[in-house]
């Protein structure tokens, strides 16, 4: 997928929305295209995930504690918090059609945190997420 298209999709993700253009480009450069067949479990609730996924084509269903939460389409994403804390997946994500994502794994992401401006942008994004969850 074209790097500029990935950058535009990343801008819509609250965690990355406050990053400078050059930092978004750096993230996009480290992302890899991944394909999943319909019915494939992409992430499993309670298991440790290795990265962040951004949907570029196809659909996926998100299920938490056995209940359907949402359907992900182009521009949908998951794994952004686990990318930072390495924690377990909070939901199960299953491809409901052939699915293509661009993915960023933790070992490609962690070195970016050494850049103070990058880290500040992420902190601002985390603040947005926290405010959204509080309904502010």
Image: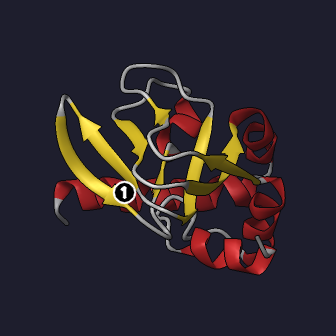
Residue lying at 21% horizontally and 48% vertically, measured from the top left: 69
Query: Where's the C terminus, which quadrant?
Result: bottom left
Is the image coloured rainbow, by chain, by secondary structure, or in one colour?
A: secondary structure
Residue 42 appears left or right of 23: left
Question: Does 132 sit left or right of 45 as displayed?
Answer: left
As drawn, the residue found furthest toward the top would be 47
Q: How many marks?
A: 1
Q: Mark 1 — residue?
A: 129
**Mark 1, secondary structure of its residue:** helix
- Return the x and y of residue 119 as percentages of the image width and height: 66, 52
Quadrant position of residue 54: bottom right
Left or right relative to 61: residue 17? right
Q: Position of residue 91 (x, y in %)?
A: 33, 35
Residue 74 vertical position relative to residue 32 in the rendered view, above or below: below
Quarter occupied by the N terminus: bottom right
Q: Is residue 93 above or below residue 30?
A: above
Residue 45 drawn at (x, y percent)? 36, 26
Residue at coordinates 54% horizontally, 70% vertically from top-left? 17
Q: Nearer the viewer, residue 106 or 60?
A: 60
Task: Say whether residue 95 is left or right of residue 29.
Answer: left
x then y, percent, for residue 110: 74, 37
From this view, report whether residue 34 is shown above or below residue 56. Answer: above
Residue density around tag 1, few if under 14, some if 14–19, many if 20 or more, within 10 Å: some
Which residue is pictured at 50% across the width and 69% down the height?
A: 75
* Residue situated in front as seen by the camera: 97 or 113: 97
């Amino acid at each position: 997928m074209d790097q500029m298209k990935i950058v535009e999709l990343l801008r819509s993700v609250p965690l990355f929305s406050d990053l400078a253009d050059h930092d978004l480009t750096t993230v996009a450069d480290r992302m890899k295209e991944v394909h999943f067949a319909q019915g494939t479990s992409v992430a499993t609730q309670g298991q440790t995930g290795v990265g962040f996924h951004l949907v570029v084509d196809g659909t996926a269903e998100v299920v938490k504690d056995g209940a359907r939460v949402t359907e992900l389409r182009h521009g949908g994403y998951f794994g952004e918090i686990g990318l930072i804390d390495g924690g377990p997946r909070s939901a199960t994500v299953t491809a409901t059609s052939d699915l293509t994502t661009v993915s960023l794994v933790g070992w490609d992401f962690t070195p970016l945190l050494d850049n103070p401006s990058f880290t500040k942008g992420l902190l601002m994004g985390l603040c947005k997420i926290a405010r959204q969850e509080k309904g502010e």
